[in-house]
Image (tube, rainbow, N blue to C red):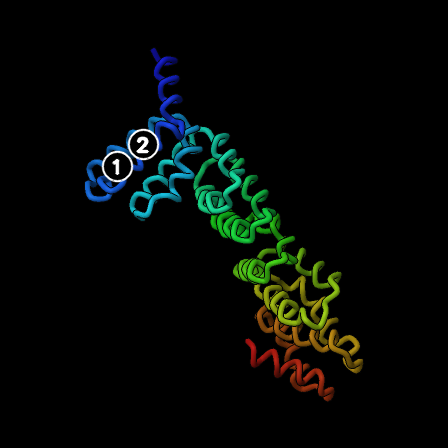
Amino acid sequence: AVPVLDHFLKEVSGYEVLNALHEVWPVLEVLGSHRRLLNQLLLLLSPEAVLAIGPMSLEVSSPNIQHDLMESISSLAGRDIVPFEQLLNHPNKKIVRRMVPLLKNIEGDRPAELLLILARNSSEQIRKAALDTLVARDRQLLPEVFPLIDDDSDHIRRLLIQYIGEDRNELVEGLLLDYLEQRKFQRNDIQHLLACYKALGRCGSVSSIPFLRRCLLKGRWIPGFNKAARRQGAAIALMALDLDEAQNLIDKASQSLYPGLRDAYKKAASSS
């Protein structure tokens, strides 16, 4: 009897059958008891039902029903994530974008793997949703999406840097140090450069001080955009580190005979 029931539930989980629900959305919005009954019925369906419910969620105007459908999709995906993976490959990017946040609470290792894949999607909105969801799911995975620091989207670059600066993290600190040492910045990159230094100060430790000391003091008599920007960035980072050794360097900059160094201190102080 169980195989027969399973076959039946699989048959009614397709779009051809579930599409009939469009006719009852207005009723369900008014009658809460009917909504609860529908939710219970959806949870009995095969996990393959997400392939039909997912597109349907875009066609429903009611926020309450949208929420119910998303809850059902999440529960079904928790039983078997394979159909949900197929949904994440849907050609309609709006559907994929709506599904991404559901990966936050689905158990297992696969959701995190899918988020890392989605963080490389061609759609900026999907990459952003994947980044937000990944950080909400497990901040320890932040180093895995560090390459987004050079994303084509300025918004995603700023979002990643914001996340980097929210916690002290030695692994992320190391990645950011390597990035700042090796990356060649252009004049139009100055805001990005300064944001990276500020994030280093917020996520870093005493391990960052040798690098920041070099940026602040080495070649201070040599003019040029890159030197000046890095001096300012180093001062910003040292202020954010909030360590005695860092403060000593800041004090040295503020009292320096070199105008460029004092200027870096003043700009850093005004931006902190």
Please identify the quarter of the rendering in which residue 266 is found: bottom right
Counting from the top left corner in percent of width and height, residue 66 is at 34, 44
Direction from residue 69 to residue 253 in the image, left or right: right
- Residue 251, compared with residue 102, is above or below; it is below
Looking at the rendered structure, the number of numbered marks drawn on it comes to: 2
Would you say residue 245 is visible in this rendering?
no
Counting from the top left corner in percent of width and height, residue 25 is at 27, 40
Q: Which residue is mark 2?
A: 20
User: Judging from the image, what secondary structure is the residue with disc 2 in?
Assistant: helix
Mark 1 Cα-neighbour bin, 10 Å: few <14, some 14–19, many ≥20:
few
- Quadrant in the picture for the C terminus: bottom right
Q: Which residue is mark 1?
A: 24
- Residue 110, compared with residue 181, is above or below; it is above
Direction from residue 144 to residue 166 in the image, left or right: left
Query: In this orientation, which residue lies closer to the viewer: 140 or 127?
Result: 127
Please identify the quarter of the rendering in which residue 193 is found: bottom right
Give me the residue at 22% from left, 40% from top.
27
Give me the residue at 69% from left, 61% from top.
177
Query: What numbered label is drawn on residue 158?
Result: none
Query: In this orientation, which residue lies closer to the viewer: 43 or 109?
Result: 43
Q: Amino acid at mark 1?
A: Val
Counting from the top left corner in percent of width and height, residue 140 is at 55, 48
Give me the residue at 55% from left, 40% from top.
114
Distance from Cα at disc 1 to Cα at disc 2: 8 Å
Name the residue furthest top.
1
